[in-house]
Amino acid sequence: KAGVTQTPRYLIKTRGQQVTLSCSPISGHRSVSWYQQTPGQGLQFLFEYFSETQRNKGNFPGRFSGRQFSNSRSEMNVSTLELGDSALYLCASRDTPYTEAFFGQGTRLTVV
Amino acid sequence: AQTVTQSQPEMSVQEAETVTLSCTYDTSESDYYLFWYKQPPSRQMILVIRQEAYKQQNATENRFSVNFQKAAKSFSLKISDSQLGDAAMYFCAYRSVAAGDAGGTSYGKLTFGQGTILTVHP
């Protein structure tokens, strides 16, 4: 079974631009959650989707948004990028919100 | 809100020796899950071990075991017979027992500690 796939692996964007990151969960998994990892703030929860509905959202500004498609793939979008958005963005999938989360290898976003 | 604290930014151990990583947490909930995740240089988070709060017995997975002290809100990870491949960042994480649908529950959200970098010396 293929694992969680995040694309792209690396991304460099300019301040003010927007970016879209993609996450393909493990086949059969319907729950996808996103986390931001930075050296200063550590791992912080962004949001979780289950069956195409956002179920929970972390404490991030509205520039951070996401969605989930009918095939459970998820995208997150960050608009008007700031230097502080530079981070590793991790996606995790699970078959239900109650079971173990499996993580992807992340997307390293650098904002210059 | 729940918080997770790892007070050891860095730890080191000799190969084949035993090391213990500390984690404390704060919660008002009575039922929850606790996890240890490993993040090697590849950056992928790998689940090492999980503990359900309602279980008094400490979880064990091969060389990895936990010391779960619910009253003290402590959840330490012991790695026995350390191997070079154990070198990584280790994160302690908390998750509520999801109470059904959305609307105020923390659902599947994981709350992580700050991490401990483990170095294994040959």
Image (cartoon, coloured by chain):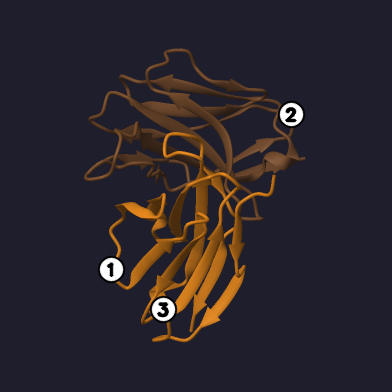
Looking at the rendered image, the disc whose residue lies closer to the viewer, 1 or 2, is: 1
Q: Could you tell me residue A5's position as x and y percent?
A: 62, 57
> Residue B113 placed where, x, y %?
41, 44
Q: Which chain is orange?
A: A
Q: Considering depth in this image, is A111 or A17 the residue closer to the camera?
A: A17
Q: Which disc number belongs to residue A44?
A: none
The residues tagged by marks 2 and 3 sit, at their Cα atoms, a distance apart of 43 Å
Provide the letter of the chain coloured brown: B
Residue located at (47% from left, 25% from top): B51
Amino acid carrying mark 2 in the image: Ala
Residue B121: which quarter of the image?
Answer: top right
Quick one: label 3, few (<14), some, or many (20+) residues within 10 Å? few
Q: Secondary structure at mark 3?
A: helix
Circle 2 packing at 10 Å, graded few (<14), some (14-19), many (20+), is some
- Above or below for B12 versus B81: below
Q: Which mark is residue B16?
A: 2
Disc sitting over residue A83 in the figure: 3
Asked if badges 1 and 2 are on one and the same chain, I answer no
Numbered badge on residue A61 = 1
Q: CA distance from mark 1 to mark 2?
A: 46 Å
- Between marks 1 and 3, how big is the CA–CA gap? 14 Å
Q: Amino acid at mark 3?
A: Leu
Task: Tell which subunit mark 2 falls on.
Answer: B
